[in-house]
Amino acid sequence: MVDNLPKTIQEFMTWNWPQVEPYYQELSKWPLKEKNVDEWLASWSDLLRYIDEWRWRLYVANTVDTTDQQTKERYKFFLEKIYPPSQEADQSLKEKLLASGLEPPGFEIPLRNMRTQVSLFQRDNLPLLSDELILVTEYDEIVGAQTVDWQGEEVTLLQLQPVYQESERDKREQAWRLAAERQLADRQAINTLWGKFLEVRRQLAANAGLGDYRAYRWRQLLRFDYSPQDCTRFHQAIEEVVVPAASQLYEKRRKRLGVKTLRPWDLEVDTLGRPALRPFEEIKELKDKVGVIFKQVSAQFGQYFEIMQREGLLDLENRKGKGPGGYCTAFLVARRPFIFMNAVGVHDDVQTLLHEGGHSFHVFETNHLPYYQQLEPPLEFAEVASMGMELLAAPYLISDYGGFYNNQQAARARIQNLESSLLFWPYMAVVDAFQHWVYENPDAASDPQNCDAKWAELWRRFMPTVDWSGLEEEMTSGWQRKEHIHGDPFYYVEYGMAQLGAVQVWRNAIDDQAEAVARYRKALSLGNTVPLPALFAKAGAKFAFDADTLTQAVKLMVDTIRELEELQG
């Protein structure tokens, strides 16, 4: 019966739970033995692929158009009527496999993960997990509806981004303040939602018999190779090594701009007074040129991206009603990735597509793995795939290779990216340290004013250079505007760890690009079949986040910035 799933995911998505349940029941009745465990796992994987793609197709539809009430209702139906019983049924199958004592080859890591998932599972948490996902859609809806009137036209806040790169300081400030005012208008709505998030998460931990949500989330995220204390040490290393380097970059910017203090609207404008980089005018141009760049990195990557273009697996342009941010997900029945982002014609859009392209190639490279549980890599390494691609692709931004820029512009774009990457580490530390405080102190964090105060404290610790005087409300409420804090708690330190891994992959590419790309691809192809440190090692990097490793990375980045500045004149 498991072999007789619908021919199309679209048909499956019209079902209800009584139609799905018999497939789980059949799997639960199989007498598991060594001779049939591969067949059983393959059948279970097929079913999981269908359930997973059902969820992600609805999620994509909901973020592509947050105003579509029909899609919202379909997603809510899935989260309330399909997701909880499917999670419960999967729990029974995990218990069945673990009880059998069987250990199929290549399944060691999934079995390790299953033991943790089984120990964490609580039936009472299933509706809470659905409630949490529904709250995430409400947050996305609030942010997706934020628009302002700019020069007689209604625009999204992201569509103001090009203005922040214009040379006229007063104009930049006007746009920045307009956006901030609109964001602050939703402050109470997000505060109300925040209380609901915390209530759900506290109950999830309590139901699992754990002392706090951080302990719950650590297990839920399957973090085996580092602890909360390691994150604290990472924050300290960033404070010691990166914050001084970042402060030097900010001070160089201030001097070049000739301003008394650096204000929030001074961070994206070119310091030499050059017009902002405008790499493309139409989305087609963005797709076509990034496709050529991917082909330069690897012919196979170019072919993968051509498939995505041909099959309509890219939704790139920003528009009203579209959800915030960018992501890449996988449609596992189709064995295809899907990229979502909000392009407005700036260089960051190029970087975002390169980044999400790295994620998409991860999906393609793992298609050979037979079982669903082998596919999804640890988040810390998934971000090496994306951040590593940004750096591997950087040499091909030049139009001589089919990219967007002349030599000087390409150098400028690479400087911009390296500076942004270096400046990211302190911001990441703010976001991660804030979340540790929240879930260590849930009573205090339930009051948004305390959250404001803690965010401001961390901001001053890790981001001390930019002048926010007179903008205290805008600064202290910054935690409201970081979607990960609301929708994907604790998923942010991975970016910092992965950035360190990506710089090591790039360092290898400086010596031998072809060999570095080959090692990178090999690591991607392993999916979730080896431990996290082994994935880093296979890619030619060390899984570490200490001051010494950071020092080496920062030195390479700063030295390269200096070389590129000489190149651009």
Image: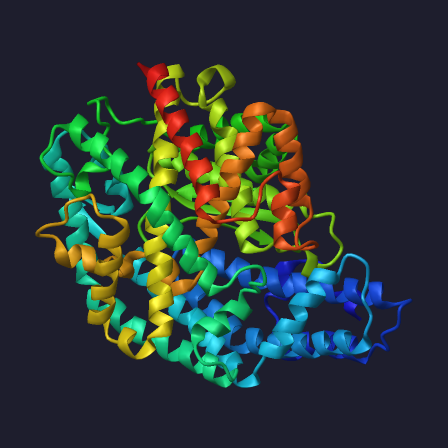
Q: Residue 82 location in percent, x, y? A: 57, 74
Tell me which residue sits at (34%, 68%) in the image: 437
Nearest the eye: 419 or 161: 419
Could you tell me how many numbered marks the image carries?
A: 0
* Residue 37 falls in image quadrant: bottom right
Q: Position of residue 200 (x, y in %)?
A: 40, 78
Q: Tell me what residue is drawn at x 22 percent, y 27 percent.
A: 271
Q: Is residue 415 left or right of residue 161?
A: right
State which quarter of the image contains the N terminus: bottom right
Please tell me which residue lies in front, 258 or 32.
258
Which residue is nearer to you in this view: 450 or 78?
450
Q: Residue at x 33, y 41 (%)?
A: 423
- Is 388 on the left or on the right of 326, as rendered? right
The residue furthest right is 35
Q: Which of the 4 quarters of the picture holds residue 477?
A: bottom left
Q: Is residue 55 visible?
A: yes
Q: Is residue 162 above or below residue 179?
A: above
The image's colour scheme reads rainbow
Q: Quadrant of the C terminus?
A: top left
User: Where is 2 relative to 287, above or below?
Assistant: below
- Is residue 6 at all visible to an observer of this figure? no
Residue 461 x %, y %: 25, 53
Relative to 494, is 244 on the left or the right?
left
Instruction: Give how far across and how far down residue 457 sits, in percent.
Output: 22, 60
What residue lies at 74% left-to-right and 47% top-to-bottom?
368
Q: Is residue 180 above or below residue 391?
A: below
Give residue 139's quadrant in the image: bottom left
